[in-house]
Image (cartoon, helix red, strand yellow):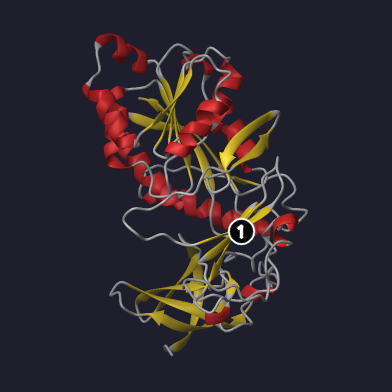
Amino acid sequence: MGTVCELDITNVAHGGVFVSRHEGRVIFVADTLPGERVLARITDASQKSFWRADTVEVLTTSADRQEHIWSAASVNRDPAQRAGGAEFGHIKLATQRDLKAFVLEDSLSRMGKIERRVEVEALEGDDESQGTGWRTRVRLHVDADGKVGPYAARSHNIIEVEDLPLAASRIAELAPFGQRIPGIDFIDLVGPSGDSARAIAGNIDTGKNKKRPAPEPITEIVGKRAFKVDVRGFWQVHRHASATLSEAVSSVIDEALFDPRAANHDLYGGVGLFAAAVGDRFGSTTRMTSVESDEMATEYALDNLAEWVGARAVTARVDRYLDSVRRDLNAVEKARYAAATIVLDPPRAGAGKEVVNSLAELSPAQLVYVACDPVALARDVALFAERGYQLEELRAFDLFPNTHHVEAVARFVKN
């Protein structure tokens, strides 16, 4: 058991934890919020510059605290027995969004070297539901004894639960609460908007020659469009996220800078969601290349983009693809890239220096960047700035209510 001490919470930090100071050292504390005084147990004292702690009792309660939306994650439980995945569930929704905005603003200031006010926008219906019932995909883990549940916060210990309040009701109904199911590693609950909900049991393949399951297409509906995606493939988990981000990506593009004949791209394109959004706005003859490393997703993208005569889908790692394009560039292609609009939706780690360097060398007219991590976005903002691209527009969305995660859509243009 770690040392227990009283701490005053002063701020929020990236990662869903909160800031306090004790005897000159920063301590990141879970399950609290600014303005509170808590009794906290030190869980990690291995770093010289900071420690980590869990709240075990709230001594002074913030007016922004609410009863946790998930009793399995409540501060009333021992920290080791708190379910993970709803780390902001004890905070009122409006305050959650203020905290997320602060983290994004602070990241941009410290790492991106720009000052920008941000409003985190709510998605349809979330205020009325207190930010519950929005998840269309949930993974439950299974231990060696067959116990099923989510991981505990910040650990791989499985917690048995009786409900999944963040999950859409039709997948929560499929959860095998209280059952023992030995011989598998996980159960994925999937509730596509255009298909029946289903539970998929699986094992984590750690072998060198991993075998991919056979394709199992499902349908997702975004506005008036249907998208095919594999049941195990990536799709935004909030029931309104795909429509919200499609609208944001489409609308943020500066029409004056858009050339439908240019070398427009959708990088990390998945099954073609954003490529389709751009095509819907600018017409079926818009030239748009989707680049995605997952071969199965690329196959779906080819089908999903079939009606756009100028669309194509390529299976490749984005960094290698851009490096190849950059090496083989001739004068005609250079002009097409200079007129291009490039959408990119990189993984949580961000685009990174190599991709930013290649994009800057191709010199597109504008870049639309979809970010799921504020620190990674801020790092890339700084990299783009060093290479002559400034952040022109920024919107942020609360795609993950009752968690610390926030999504942003940014547009960059050449200085």
Tell me if I can see residue 283 in this picture: yes
Please name the residue shown 59% across and 54% down the image: 98
Question: Would residue 388 be found to the left or right of residue 217 on screen?
Answer: left
Q: Which image quadrant is residue 216 in?
A: top right
At which x and y percent is residue 177?
A: 68, 72
- Disc 1 marks a residue whose amino acid type is Gln
Please name the residue shown 55% across and 27% down the image: 303
Question: Would residue 392 be found to the left or right of residue 189 on screen?
Answer: left
The image shows residue 346, relative to residue 309, as above or below, that is below
| Mark 1 secondary-structure assignment | helix
Tell me if I can see residue 38 in this picture: no
The image shows residue 71, relative to residue 259, as above or below, that is below
At which x and y percent is residue 374?
A: 45, 49
At which x and y percent is residue 148?
A: 59, 72
Looking at this view, is 174 or 410 the one in front? 174
Quickly name the residue at label 1.
Answer: 96
